[in-house]
Image (tube, rainbow, N blue to C red):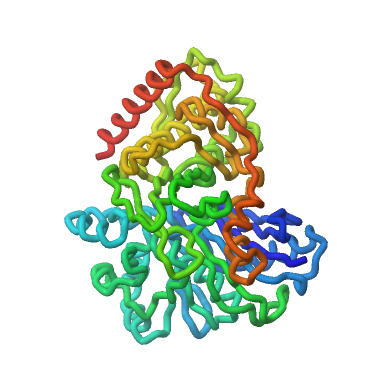
């Protein structure tokens, strides 16, 4: 029996999962990650803490699986995308906190250069927004006049979280990333799959900082000098978390689609080798790739999904555990039409209003935690419905159903609401950790645990199914109210 270790480094936690040849989880462990908010709109992580959580969860996952590290065949890695680390090569020391994908400090930089967005978008598939990595690297380099010279001389390295972890896992021997992560930086030409010199000049990012781009199923080096893993264990699969989740749900080919509900909500539809240019402000990125051939996805991003639940729990202290929100929402007063637009860190696709903030409509004296809980969950469902409607217009292919995974996919009330506002069946993954499994699948393919994509397809089974029950007229009425609320937020913050 062969086993794969998947490392899933997310925005709010780090997880390790051990998978067997049947694609089943044998054991897992997780650690929450501290979020830093030094100023309004700024979001940071401690890069050293990220690495330390990895060193903790791997031994715990192996213990939970009843295994020794020597029994592992390969490592797969998946990560929060766009978040950037800048470090010194000689010491492996980060030179600043990691700037998280949610961070908005470069909003003014993007506003001042908005006239350049058309050519940037054509080349990268993205828009000019603080969300993406290039503006964050630019900001980091501007904080010290000596950094750019050190970067140009090859003394510094920068990368997304996958590159940071690969660097540490390999004892500083490998500085690499995969195509899916690279395509989220605003520095990659997605037509060629290579870093673009003109983009590097535009963002003033020295090319010497950047990692080598490889397919998602590839040789990313082997472990070296770790006290919790043996030397020589291959790192063979790497993908950004959303592309990894699509792969883990069996989304290998054109037409496959999924939505992952984590800190944010991310809808991806695979378009095969066909690059679709969105007419509705969606994004085009590279899919997780098993060889040098480029595969594409069209994507819509909702910045706040599970983070809205977390805010109700930790910010307003309306409940002690996130799972309690389901019961509160079920018992909300249906006669209170509360609407919550959870734009805490700006609005993502298809609107892209980086300065927007969260707004609640319809508060009354008798509003309680129940109504706020319901409105928060509905706000996520409505945002996802907007993404899927825009995608259908771009592809000309309405979805027959929606596959879902992530933490909020455990909430049956929420998934029924999602089905109702979509007017489509919603089908969960039988294994909720599709993101980690996608990384394991990629690594296992590379080292020969699974021979091809067909062998992986046979391992994937659907979970629960939620069919829509809301009459079309009522569904349209609710969406119309939602769109009026969104327009009000856009008008106020634009």
Q: Residue furthest left?
A: 115
Res 130 visible: no
Residue pictured at 60% horizontal, 50% vertical: 434
Place of residue 110 in the rendered image (x, y in percent of width and height, measured from the top left) = 26, 56
Image-quadrant location for residue 170: bottom right
Answer above or below: position of 248 versus 413.
below
- State the residue in front, 384 or 159: 384
In which quadrant is the C terminus drawn? top left
Q: Residue furthest right?
A: 66
**Residue 411 falls left or right of residue 477:** right
Place of residue 43 in the rendered image (x, y in percent of width and height, measured from the top left) = 45, 54
Residue pictured at 41% horizontal, 28% vertical: 360
- State the residue in front, 3 or 354: 3
Answer above or below: position of 368 versus 401.
above
Residue pictured at 48% horizontal, 30% vertical: 424
Res 417 visible: yes
Place of residue 92 in the rendered image (x, y in percent of width and height, measured from the top left) = 53, 79
- State the residue in front, 91 or 81: 81
**Residue 160 falls left or right of residue 188:** right
Image-quadrant location for residue 76: bottom right
Q: How many marks?
A: 0
In which quadrant is the N terminus drawn? bottom right
Residue pictured at 59% horizontal, 62% vertical: 452
Place of residue 175 in the rendered image (x, y in percent of width and height, measured from the top left) = 49, 77
């Amino acid at each position: 029996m062969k086993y794969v270790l998947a490392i899933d480094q997310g925005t709010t936690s780090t997880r390790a999962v051990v998978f067997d040849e049947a694609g089943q989880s044998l054991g897992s462990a997780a650690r929450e990650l501290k979020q830093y908010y030094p100023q309004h709109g700024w979001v940071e992580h401690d890069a050293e803490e990220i690495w330390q959580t990895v060193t903790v969860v791997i031994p715990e996952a192996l213990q939970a699986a009843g295994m020794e590290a020597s029994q592992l065949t390969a490592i797969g890695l998946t990560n929060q995308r766009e978040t950037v680390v800048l470090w010194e090569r000689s010491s492996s020391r980060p030179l600043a906190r990691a700037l998280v994908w949610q961070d908005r400090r470069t909003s003014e930089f993007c506003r001042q250069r908005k006239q350049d967005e058309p050519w940037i978008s054509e080349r990268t598939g993205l828009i000019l927004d603080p969300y993406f990595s290039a503006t964050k690297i630019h900001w980091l380099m501007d904080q010290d006049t000596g950094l750019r010279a050190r970067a140009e001389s090859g003394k510094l390295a920068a990368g997304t979280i996958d590159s940071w972890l690969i660097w540490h896992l390999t004892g500083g021997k490998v500085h690499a990333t995969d195509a899916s992560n690279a395509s989220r930086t605003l520095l990659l030409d997605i037509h060629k799959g290579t870093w673009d010199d003109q983009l590097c000049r535009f963002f003033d990012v020295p090319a010497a900082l950047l990692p080598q781009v490889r397919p998602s199923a590839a040789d990313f080096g082997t472990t070296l000098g770790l006290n919790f893993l043996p030397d020589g264990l291959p790192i063979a699969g790497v993908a950004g978390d959303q592309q990894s989740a699509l792969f883990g749900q069996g989304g290998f080919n054109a037409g496959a689609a999924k939505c992952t509900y984590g800190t944010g909500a991310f809808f991806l539809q695979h378009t095969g080798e066909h690059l679709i240019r969105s007419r509705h402000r969606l994004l085009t990125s590279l899919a997780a790739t098993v060889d040098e051939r480029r595969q594409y996805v069209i994507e819509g991003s909702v910045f706040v999904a599970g983070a809205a639940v977390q805010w109700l729990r930790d910010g307003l202290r309306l409940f002690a555990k996130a799972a309690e929100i389901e019961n509160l929402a079920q018992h909300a007063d249906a006669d209170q039409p509360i609407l919550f637009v959870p734009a805490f860190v700006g609005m993502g696709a298809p609107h892209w209003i980086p300065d927007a903030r969260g707004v609640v409509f319809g508060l009354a004296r008798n509003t309680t935690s129940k109504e706020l809980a319901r409105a928060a969950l509905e706000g996520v469902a409505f945002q996802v419905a907007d993404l899927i409607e825009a995608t259908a217009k771009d592809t000309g292919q309405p979805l027959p159903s929606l596959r879902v995974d992530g933490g909020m996919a455990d909430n049956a009330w929420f998934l029924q609401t999602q089905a109702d506002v979509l007017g489509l069946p919603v089908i969960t993954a039988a294994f909720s950790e599709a993101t980690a499994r996608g990384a394991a699948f990629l690594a296992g393919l590379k080292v020969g645990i699974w021979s091809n994509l067909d062998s992986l397809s046979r391992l994937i089974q659907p979970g629960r199914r939620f069919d829509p029950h809301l009459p079309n007229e009522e569904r349209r009425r609710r969406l119309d109210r939602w769109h009026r609320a969104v327009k009000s937020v856009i008008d106020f913050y634009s």
